[in-house]
Amino acid sequence: MLAIDSHTGGEPTRVIIEGGPDLGTGPLSARRARFAEAFDDVRRMVVLEPRGAGATVGALLCEPHDPACAAGVIFFDAAGFLGMCGHGTIGLAATLVYLGRLAPGRHRLETPVGVVEVDILGPHDVRIENVPSYRYRRGVAVDAPGLGRVVGDVAWGGNWFFVVDGAPAPLAPEHAPALTDAAMRVRRALAAAGVAGEGGAEIDHVEFFGAPAGEGEGLGDKSGARPDGRNFVLCPGGAYDRSPCGTGLSAKLACLAADGKLRPGEPWVQESLIGSRFTASYRPGEAGRIIPSITGAAYVCAETRLIFNDRDPFRLGVSCAPAHY
């Protein structure tokens, strides 16, 4: 199996370009379901240790169902399958540029939750226009053991998020273990209280927001603009997002827009726990939703041939998620 590895703001993406499972044709949502039902071993082998790591997001490059799209993609991680992945889409676009399959300009990419518009600004710089995003519930309170009452918004940005203003520990890399533990407690509290996304969907991402760490040019941001906030995002598999998280940022923009705190077209610079940045804005969508626009940079870092040996006792990967997750 051949793959191209990249990172977006420090968060890894592994794009399978050859040798992936044959999922047939049809809508990407149906092919994602087929992937999960019949080929979950492939997901595990691609992203889990020893070939991957807890933060790795896999992306299966597919023929699109929509003929207006340049490519289709199904994202997955250590815990399962994703609807959309912002950093992964930026990484996929940079990978397709690296392979000579996309030229500068605007393109459409198909995901299981909708079509994403992609602007290739250069060999590394990409702007994506995400799927329509919205706040589903405002000011939801849960009691998390060891933390007490935690209040946040339930929002959709391509995945379901519980968006919390404030953090239980400083938003710095050395506090990642404490932040991870707190976010896990919040996620368990949400499940215990029956708090869910629309249609009972599981809230599988928890996001803490706080003040930015500094000014000047950030990692992955060339504007020199002062960041507006810093975040910590716990992903479904128990790893935290090294990037500012494109779908999480989309969910945050939806909350800011709903509260009248960010105007259409007004830029928002988001900083991750490790200091990488995305620049974002939005335009109004239909039915009270917004269309987020997110700009970031991705860098191809490896051409990888994955080898699966039937005699390898760990050929299906090793899950190293925290035992208490």
Image (cartoon, helix red, strand yellow):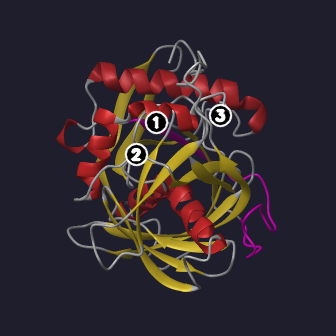
Residue 279 seen in the current view: no
Tell me the number on the disc at residue 21: 2
- Residue pointed to by mark 1: 42
Percent x, y of residue 16: 53, 52
Magenta stretch holds residue 161: no
Main SS category, magenta section: loop
Q: Residue at x 60, y 37 (%)?
A: 240
Q: Are marks 1 and 2 in contact (CB under 8 Å)?
A: yes
Q: Is label 3 in a helix, a strand or a loop?
A: loop
Q: Is residue 312 visible?
A: yes
Image mark for residue 133? none
Q: Residue at x 78, y 32 (%)?
A: 174
Bin the neighbour count of mark 1 within 10 Å (Cα to Cα): few under 14, some 14-19, many 20 and up.
Answer: some
In the image, residue 238 above or below residue 261: above
Give the amino acid at mark 2: Pro
* Residues rendered magenta in the picture: 204-226
Amino acid type at circle 3 is: Arg
N-terminal of the two: label 3 or label 1?
Answer: 1
| Earlier sequence position, callout 1 versus callout 2 | 2
The mark lying in front, picked from 3 and 2, is 2
Q: Nearer the viewer, residue 152 or 79?
A: 79
Comes first in the chain, label 3 or label 2: 2
Q: Is residue 215 magenta?
A: yes
Cα–Cα span, label 1 and label 2: 8 Å
Cα separation, mark 3 vs mark 2, equals 18 Å
Q: Which residue is mark 3?
A: 51
Q: Residue furthest bottom?
A: 105
Q: Nearer the viewer, residue 228 or 241?
A: 241
Residue 269 placement: quadrant: bottom right
